[in-house]
Image (cartoon, rainbow, N blue to C red):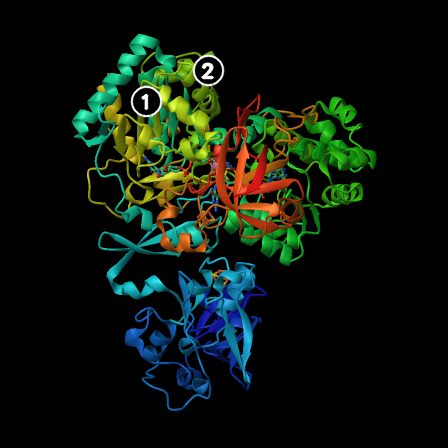
Amino acid sequence: MVNIIIDGKNIQAKEGSTLLESAVSGGIKIPTLCYLKEVSTIGACRLCVVEVEGMEQLVTSCNTPVKEGMVVRSRSEKVIKSRKMTLDLILSNHSTNCFSCPKNGDCGLQSYCKEYGIEKSSYEGSRSKIKKEILHSHPFLSYDPSLCIHCQRCINTCSKTVGRKAITSGKNGIFTVIDAPFGEDWKNTICESCGNCAQACPTGALTEGRRKKYQPWEVRKVLTTCPHCGTGCQLYLVVRGNKIVDVVSAEGPSNKGRLCVKGRSGSFDFIHSKERLKYPLIKNKKTGEFEKATWEEAMDLVASKFLELKKEYGPDSLAGFACSRSPNEDIYMMQKMVRTCFGTNNVDNCARVCHSASVAGLAMTLGSGAMTNPIYDITHHDVDCILLIGSNPEEAHPVVGMQIRKAVGEGARLIVVDPRDIGLSKQADIHLKLKPGTNVAFANGMLNVILSEGLEDKEFIKERTEGYEVLAEIVKDYTPEKVAEICHIHPDQLREAARMYAAAKKAPIIYCLGVTEHSTGTEGVMSISNLAMAVGKLGKPGCGVNPLRGQNNVQGACDMGAMPGDFPGYQKVRNPEVIEKFEKAWGVPLNHKQGTHATDVFPAATEGRIKGLYIFGEDPVVSDPDTHHVIKALESLDFLVVQELFMTETARYADVVLPGVSYAEKEGTFTNTERRVQRVRKAVTIEGEMRSDADIFMDLMNRMGYSQPYLTASEIMEEIASVTPSFAGISYERLDAGESLQWPCTGKSHNGTPIMHVGKFTRGLGWFFPAEYRPSAELPDEEYPIIMMTGRILAHYNARAMTGRTPGLNEIEGRSFIEMNEKDALKLGIVNGDRVKVSSRRGVIESTARVGVKVSQGESWMPFHFQDGNANWLTNAALDEYARIPEYKVCAIKIEKA
Ligand SMILES: Nc1nc2c(c(=O)[nH]1)N[C@H]1C(S)=C(S)[C@@H](COP(=O)(O)OP(=O)(O)OC[C@H]3O[C@@H](n4cnc5c(=O)[nH]c(N)nc54)[C@H](O)[C@@H]3O)O[C@H]1N2
Ligand SMILES: Nc1nc2c(c(=O)[nH]1)N[C@H]1C(S)=C(S)[C@@H](COP(=O)(O)OP(=O)(O)OC[C@H]3O[C@@H](n4cnc5c(=O)[nH]c(N)nc54)[C@H](O)[C@@H]3O)O[C@H]1N2
Ligand code: SF4
Ligand code: SF4
Ligand SMILES: [Mo]
């Protein structure tokens, strides 16, 4: 610490900090238009000047380091005069049509001019003469050069915070200008439409179009959590009256002020959509049409129907799927309803088709199936090497992707293991473009190199693990040459990757569905955990095995016990003591039998073993593999209830449709991928008869004869904490007081657990799984010669119920396509943009070909978001033996010109 004096006030400042930072810490305001904390300290706007005793010239405080004994004046006559002159000069090049400016009333320049008494400029700026074109072709963003003050905040934000470098400095004659990617060719730029640049712009130069539609003084801001992916970005919903008009980012632990395009521009249109379900619907059996019903009618029908089926066919003929987009409190109530009223453990959530292999696999090897380290910890600049396996974070977890790009830009090594060229593979030191479905062989190959070159952590293996000898024997067979043949990679590249990962000190493994969504998904996960254990990279900062969980609250859905074998907090159904504990807590006898996995519910329904199904916020007709078999199963049911925001493809098959409410219309919590429990807050009330999802469950429970008191979200969290040891210390009181808690949080004075397995695995000793490579269930042959992988793209989210209702996102990408290799295309006479017929043993669709080298020869890739050609008519419902996860990532197809 050093001591300085600013405006007569003694301030203790951190050594190495700047005058501006120390002034702020001492509560002294200094104006600035170009400074951004940790991003931009270029001193370009010169508004932050201060006078330092002993220095002749004024200095820019944003980039002047503090020195012991400095005496500073931040508001002396000289300083004020200089600032006035600066503002006068800036204004000379700035259009002052404030009335027509989208930032009127919320503009840094306007407010400083007011503060310093500058009404108009006394100069005519030379820049004001250059030809300027407003760029506004982009669906969300626009740039008006006449309002640009060249502070470069947008450039610095895009390059440093977002790591994208989509905005650059250009030239117009002798002037340096901003080249913003929002002109007519916006689609051909590398811009990700995240809008972080617009949020950084202090004036109305770079803005979102929607800014024009509200005034800053008419709105209030509600702090909440993004409803899309598991990154868990914190954001403010900007609300005017009862309408969300905008989103701005908040400073959350996982996003640090960033958002991606879906969080910023795709999380409010759907809430106000005219297509929202507004009242309960009952299907008229004769006409097959839905008819409007009262809540009384609908709820009585649902309660009596489930009781009737239970009586006739037994409790295990009923099942429920919980919504991973919905808060913990709703999900907790749903599984409680299924267990206490349906009387079965047949309750599951979309993790079954997503990361169930991680939950099962890591629980077996480490004792806990969750991400081991926080996002910030594994993407921070001191990380040495990131091993990214089957994960496309630039599109699927974009704010994590931004932080990985930043880390790599700052020197971290990057190894990408993915069959496709993804955005991050361009930045990678090594890209292992392996054949789909060969992850276990790859991991064993890495281990072969590590063990044969003596790169393993012998002490860690000895002290903290078991099962090493068996695995070491198995991997002897997986020589780089053999693995190279299985995986279609180069043996030396594998050697190099193994050495790079093993030698790095801080080296996290980050993985996702490219590992899990296989018929060998759980083995894939366990072989990755083998890899990390062998080099001792667990239970340490900047390391770990890190599955990026998909849905905003899929971590929570698993934690809350929406799983056939687990009560809340992974307390096992197979453990009689656990059953006894919940029987006591809930006051009714419970079913002792493990439940049916969601993916097994469909064949069970077709075979008549499942009769009644309650789907809360999932759309399996779109998202589950092999659509025909899903539809057949739904049609075989005696009774289907769907509780939704919209009339989805799945809801069309329901007997009763119940309208729930979205994240912006209720209180609750989401748990993000790093096990962080974050608040969701009510921002608006939408007109209609919709009810909060937890309320619907509590009402139904009472109608089914279980006496469930009506609890608020906060009271439900109290109940969760009381029955779940890992949540025991979590409460709304703590969260609303600003604490950020990652479970396990075992008591009121426990601060949560950022890094798991420190010193000891949850399981005790870590277990090396004896993994052997097995090929995918369906391999290409003469009839269906091409492997199809499936996945997601940046602008859309799963079945698109939400993102599909934002017109701008549909403009960015709105139709089905299939990526194929140019050599395959040439053979088939297909060129880029051709319509193609794509078929598998299970179905036929049409799509548009995207020809190139993103995928290798003999391989292809499709998103599953688009109904005009959905990959899931073709995908294979082959299941993994441990987690029952489907093989979305590999099936055999044929492509023909349509
Ligand atoms: N924009 C957007 N973001 C989303 C979602 C969305 O729909 N849209 N959905 C959310 C959900 S639910 C989830 S679970 C996550 C998923 O996030 P990710 O898993 O990152 O996304 P995917 O595109 O399914 O697949 C990731 C990568 O796996 C690769 N891959 C395919 N087969 C293999 C293989 O055999 N081995 C290896 N090593 N890699 C392979 C693919 O090429 C792809 O790049 O995203 C979440 N975020
Ligand atoms: N081919 C292929 N298919 C895949 C995948 C793949 O990689 N390839 N990935 C799979 C994966 S990882 C996943 S997670 C699944 C996702 O599959 P789904 O879970 O079916 O997909 P979502 O579109 O997220 O559906 C969520 C539904 O919840 C509703 N909803 C949102 N919030 C609420 C709420 O608060 N209350 C209520 N009542 N409803 C709400 C939305 O309207 C939406 O219809 O897709 C899987 N499908
Ligand atoms: S929208 Fe995002 S990617 Fe595009 S220029 Fe702005 S900061 Fe860069
Ligand atoms: S990265 Fe995920 S959580 Fe963050 S804004 Fe984007 S969709 Fe939302
Ligand atoms: Mo997912």
**In this figure, which residue is indicated by the disc labeled 1?**
337
- Tell whether label 1 touches label 2 (CB within 8 Å): no
Q: Secondary structure at mark 1?
A: helix
Q: Residue at x 31, y 12 (%)?
A: 310
Residue 749 placement: quadrant: top left
Residue 534, how many percent across, how many down?
Answer: 72, 33
Q: Check disc 2 and report the residue beneath it.
A: 594
User: Depth check: 811 or 16 in front?
Assistant: 811
Residue beneath the point at 26% across and 64% down? 217
Residue 13: percent from the left, percent from the top? Answer: 52, 65
Apparent side of residue 52 relative to residue 802 in the rendered image (left or right): right
Q: Is residue 209 visible?
A: yes
Question: How many other residues sit within 10 Å of disc 1, few (<14), some (14-19) or many (≥20)?
Answer: many
Frontmost residue, 658 versus 103: 658
User: Residue farthest to the right?
Assistant: 453
| Position above or below: 171 against 520 | below
What's the mark number on residue 294?
none
Where's residue 297, x and y in %? 17, 25
Amino acid type of the residue tagged 1 in the rendering? Met
Residue 739 lies in what quarter of the image?
A: top left
Q: Is residue 534 above or below residue 309?
A: below
Residue nearer the viewer, 65 or 339? 339
Q: Position of residue 320 (x, y in %)?
A: 37, 24
Tally the marks: 2
Q: Is residue 588 left or right of residue 689?
A: right
Dot 2 or dot 1: first in sequence order is 1
Extreme residue toward the bottom, this view: 123
Name the amino acid type tagged 2: Gln
> Residue 744: in sight, yes or no?
no
Q: Nearer the viewer, residue 78 or 455?
A: 455
Query: What SS does tag 2 mark?
Result: loop
Q: CA distance from mark 2 to mark 1?
A: 16 Å
